[in-house]
Image (tube, rainbow, N blue to C red):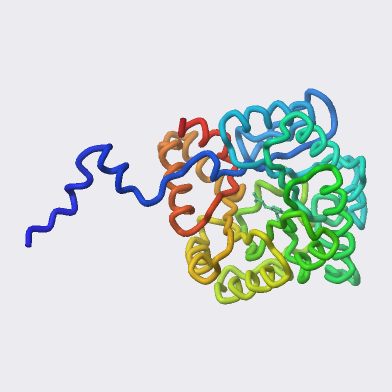
């Protein structure tokens, strides 16, 4: 036998013909930060190229994303006021609610996903309300329900509970039977959220999130978390972060026949950006290679701060 694996690598045409994993703009979801005001575009220092936008500029960004074929927009709000219960999270006039209405008005066919969590809205920075210095899981659930209801009323296409509270998916499903839920099913307590916390002003003021987010050493636990979210009614399950958890993504793909997303988080963006800016790696190639790896591992779609850029690069 004369075996020649190189034969199919000879030309770009042949390589493309047999390529198993190909990215397209529709596989990518762009996370955006929205803040109050008009004409405001505030740079996020640890995420060069990313901004907190006021609703009018967010609408312009949504138009651009729609044109480049990006799959959806994920929205995070920067509230004007924080308190112990995170009240602005469920206010009808909250920044996210306003922004969803504005985007859906202007670009109705771009799906809008909202983050359902309290950490950006509480003065202590935890993802739920506190009792005796601990996050009180069950008293947090009704607040998440109110938040998701207010997002759906504003026109959100999907709601995404990201706080790793037990029972959150079931609680949202109970009050929103017909709104798709993107469950942050397996979310790890990760150092790679650092830049996001600067962007969203959501770092915990004391302690950390390892009491509710998952331990990086575990992957059987991720499968249990995912199974629970599916039982509770999740329409889409997600693994987060992506790059350091490709094995978890692969196991989830093999175990569950369910729509599967991966979140390439702020720290992953920062790594690529920093090395790219220094000329140490070819940013474009490295980004597309990593996004391909995430899809190859099993993700149906990817949440990434490179969504807008990568969609441009692909066309
Ligand atoms: C809030 C939330 C976080 C992210 C998304 N939603 C941060 C956290 O858990 O502290 C991280 C996103 C990123 O780093 O890009 N619960």
Residue at left 47%, top 40%?
Answer: 275
Res 27 quadrant in image: top right
Residue at left 69%, top 63%?
Answer: 234
Pinpoint residue 110: horizontal percent, then vertical percent: 67, 37
Residue at left 89%, top 68%?
Answer: 139
In the image, residue 75 sits, relative to residue 172, either above or below, namely above
Pinpoint residue 134: horizontal percent, then vertical percent: 84, 70
Please identify the residue farthest to the front as the structure is shown. 178
In the image, residue 79 sits, relative to residue 67, either above or below, namely below
| Left or right: residue 275 compared with residue 116 | left
In the image, residue 288 sits, relative to residue 149, either above or below, namely above
Pinpoint residue 112: horizontal percent, then vertical percent: 71, 42
Pinpoint residue 171: horizontal percent, then vertical percent: 82, 66
| Left or right: residue 276 compared with residue 169 | left
Instruction: Give the tally of numbered discs.
Output: 0
Please identify the residue farthest to the top as the structure is shown. 39
Residue at left 17%, top 47%?
Answer: 7
In the image, residue 298 sits, relative to residue 94, either above or below, namely below
Res 79 quadrant in image: top right
Towards the viewer: 236 or 289? 236
Towards the viewer: 112 or 119? 112
Towards the viewer: 21 or 241? 21
What is the quadrant of the N terminus in the image?
bottom left
| Left or right: residue 174 compared with residue 297 | right
């Amino acid at each position: 036998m004369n075996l020649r694996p190189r034969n199919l690598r000879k030309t770009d045409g042949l390589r493309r013909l047999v390529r198993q994993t190909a990215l397209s703009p529709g596989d990518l979801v762009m996370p955006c930060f929205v803040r109050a005001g008009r004409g405001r575009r505030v740079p996020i220092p640890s995420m060069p190229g990313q901004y907190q936008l006021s609703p009018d500029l967010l609408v312009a960004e949504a138009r651009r994303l729609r044109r480049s074929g990006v799959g959806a927009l994920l929205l995070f709000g920067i509230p004007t006021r924080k308190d112990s219960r995170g009240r602005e999270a469920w206010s009808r006039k909250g920044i996210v609610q306003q922004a969803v209405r504005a985007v859906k008005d202007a670009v109705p066919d771009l799906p809008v996903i909202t983050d359902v969590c309290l950490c950006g809205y509480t003065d202590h920075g935890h993802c739920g309300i506190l009792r005796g210095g601990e996050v009180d899981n069950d008293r947090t659930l009704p607040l998440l329900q109110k938040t998701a209801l207010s997002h759906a009323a504003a026109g959100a296409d999907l709601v995404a509970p990201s706080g790793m509270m037990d029972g959150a998916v079931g609680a949202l499903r109970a009050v929103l039977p017909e709104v798709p839920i993107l469950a942050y099913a397996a979310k790890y307590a990760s150092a790679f959220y650092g830049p996001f916390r600067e962007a969203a002003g959501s770092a915990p003021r004391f302690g950390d999130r390892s009491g509710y987010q998952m331990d990086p050493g575990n992957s059987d636990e991720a499968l249990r978390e995912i199974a629970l979210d599916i039982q509770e009614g999740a329409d889409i399950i997600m693994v987060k972060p992506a790059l350091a958890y490709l094995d978890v993504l692969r196991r989830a793909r093999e175990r569950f026949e369910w729509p599967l997303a991966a979140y390439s988080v702020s720290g992953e963006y920062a790594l690529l950006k920093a090395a790219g800016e220094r000329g140490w790696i070819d940013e474009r190639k490295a980004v597309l290679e990593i996004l391909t790896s995430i899809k190859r591992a099993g993700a149906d779609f990817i949440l990434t701060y490179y969504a807008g850029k990568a969609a441009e690069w692909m066309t």
